[in-house]
Image: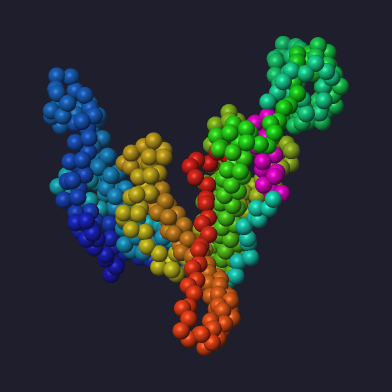
């Protein structure tokens, strides 16, 4: 007998039945009631009536048979089936407490007025055991914002806001030089000597406006092409000297700050915020490394292969967007003797990502993390908005597997946040205890002195002590230093 779970939330009365489970292989069946099937049909027809324009009929008034003739027979059933799968697959997996690596969905025919069933065969994640982390002490710290860091950051601001003025002299190391490259493919462009390559800088230093200069470019590799040593001839069109502003109130005002002191205050607050964020990220990574290095799990090769293949597809897509075909790039790496190294790195990265996901999912399970429907829908809506879609379009693009993967990522992040909060509590309690002990120690001599005073002057009025807490002013408004 299979295990049956009936969903009743939000009026759902569908049945998810676990048919079999052997090791990490699982099969289950989902039955969607006729009432939900009818709702899906109504929603699809409503959308078609709104969007499909039929000559001779007002919007929304064309008969269904006429609309079906325009969109094609079977289109409505296909849309209904997709809608039902998207709505019920991931929920059924959650109800059966299955975390699926991969799944093959076999849907039955969908018919208006009848229940809809589909069967899922898939693989679950392997059993994972985490080492005890409850007393783990994390050593990663936030970078210290020293006076030296402040001065370097202010110096960078000065450099980024520097101006250039015409200079009637020979070229110096920090100048901006505009050159006109000779030849058919030439053009006019600026060269910043302080960041130029050594062979360019050496060829131009000491030259003047109007000079013709030959720059020897050493052999180098660019993308999948090997460029031999060659010469480029340029004519110097103008020379400009870099002018940085003094670090004063006028400079601060040019960046929309009231004065230099306010610039320093807001800049330090921003640097400390980023340092705290960097420290938190480092502690998170230290914690995750502890989990993955000490966990006990037999990871199926198929899981690693799937992750590696998915990462390879991402690389191919990225190359395609840059106009590079994967076959050409693969051949180039083969010629260079680097293909084996590339594939080995890809496999190592895939294994690292799989271990990370497994550890964090087990962590979320151990902590009994829950992601409510409201939380999930809120994040899905935000993701859809960020990608310029409505939630229905996003769900369709992700598909059932994509939605399940996204749900798992939310669980992992929420579990990690909860664990980090637990690890920080003892630290906070220890700091609070130390502060309380220090306050008591400081107050003890004063209390003793007050007692002596009371004994000597019993009728004297006791002085009142008022402690004023210092106010800490954080940066206000927008970050103007980015």
Q: Describe residue 123's horizontal placement relative to residue 241 as left or right.
A: left
- Look at the image and tell me whether residue 149 can be seen: yes
Q: Describe residue 173's horizontal placement relative to residue 46 as left or right.
A: right
Q: Position of residue 74 (x, y in %)?
A: 24, 36
Given residues 99 and 202, the one toward you in this image is 202
Q: Please tell me which residue is depicted at 71% across the width and 30% down the height of the picture.
A: 244
Given residues 66 and 393, the one toward you in this image is 393
Q: Is residue 331 magenta?
A: no
Instruction: Examine the rendered structure and indicate whether residue 94 appears above or below residue 209.
Output: below
Instruction: Examine the rendered structure and indicate whether residue 7 appears above or below residue 42.
Output: below
Q: Position of residue 86 (x, y in %)?
A: 32, 48
Quadrant in the rendering for residue 249: top right
Q: Where is residue 389 in the image (x, y as percent from the top left)?
A: 36, 37
Given residues 215 and 470, the one toward you in this image is 470
Find the magenta span and give its range. 148-162
- Look at the image and tell me whether residue 229 can be seen: no
């Amino acid at each position: 007998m299979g295990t049956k779970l009936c969903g009743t939330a939000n009026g759902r009365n569908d049945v998810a039945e676990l048919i079999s489970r052997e090791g990490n292989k699982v099969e289950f069946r989902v039955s969607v009631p006729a009432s939900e099937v009818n709702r899906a049909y109504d929603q699809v027809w409503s959308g078609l009536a709104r969007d499909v324009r039929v000559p001779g009929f007002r919007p929304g008034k064309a008969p269904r048979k006429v609309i079906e003739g325009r969109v094609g027979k079977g289109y409505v059933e296909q849309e209904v089936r997709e809608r039902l799968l998207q709505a019920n697959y991931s929920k059924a997996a959650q109800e059966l407490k299955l975390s699926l690596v991969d799944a093959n969905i076999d849907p039955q025919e969908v018919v208006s007025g009848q229940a809809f069933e589909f069967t899922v065969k898939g693989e679950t994640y392997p059993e994972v055991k985490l080492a005890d982390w409850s007393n783990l002490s994390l050593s990663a710290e936030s970078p210290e914002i020293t006076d030296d860091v402040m001065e370097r950051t202010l110096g960078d601001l000065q450099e980024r806001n520097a101006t250039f003025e015409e200079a009637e002299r020979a070229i110096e190391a920090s100048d901006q030089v505009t050159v006109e490259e000779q030849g058919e493919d030439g053009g006019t462009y600026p060269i910043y000597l302080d960041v130029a390559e050594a062979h360019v800088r050496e060829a131009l230093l000491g030259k003047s406006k109007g000079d013709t200069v030959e720059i020897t470019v050493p052999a180098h590799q660019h993308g999948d092409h090997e460029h031999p040593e060659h010469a480029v001839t340029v004519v110097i069109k103008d020379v400009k000297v870099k002018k940085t502003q003094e670090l004063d109130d006028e400079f601060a005002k040019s960046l929309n700050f009231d004065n230099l002191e306010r610039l320093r205050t807001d800049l330090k607050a921003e640097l400390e915020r980023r340092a705290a964020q960097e420290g938190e990220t480092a502690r998170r990574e230290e914690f995750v490394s502890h989990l993955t290095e000490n966990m006990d799990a037999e990871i199926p090769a198929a899981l690693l292969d799937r992750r590696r293949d998915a990462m390879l597809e991402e690389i191919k897509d990225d190359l395609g967007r840059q106009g590079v075909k994967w076959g050409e790039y693969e051949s180039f790496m083969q010629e260079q003797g680097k293909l084996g190294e590339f594939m080995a790195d890809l496999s190592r990265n895939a294994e690292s990502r799989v271990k990370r996901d497994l550890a964090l999912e087990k962590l979320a399970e151990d902590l009994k993390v829950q992601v409510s429907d409201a939380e999930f829908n809120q994040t899905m809506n935000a993701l859809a908005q960020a990608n310029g879609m409505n939630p229905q379009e996003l769900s369709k693009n992700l598909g059932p597997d994509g939605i399940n993967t996204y749900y798992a990522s939310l669980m992992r992040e929420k579990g990690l946040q909860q664990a980090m909060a637990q690890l920080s509590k003892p630290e906070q309690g220890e700091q609070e205890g130390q502060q309380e002990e220090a306050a008591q120690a400081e107050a003890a001599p004063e209390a003793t002195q007050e007692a002596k005073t009371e004994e000597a002057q019993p009728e004297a009025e006791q002085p009142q002590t008022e402690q004023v807490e210092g106010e800490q002013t954080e940066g206000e408004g927008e970050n103007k230093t980015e």
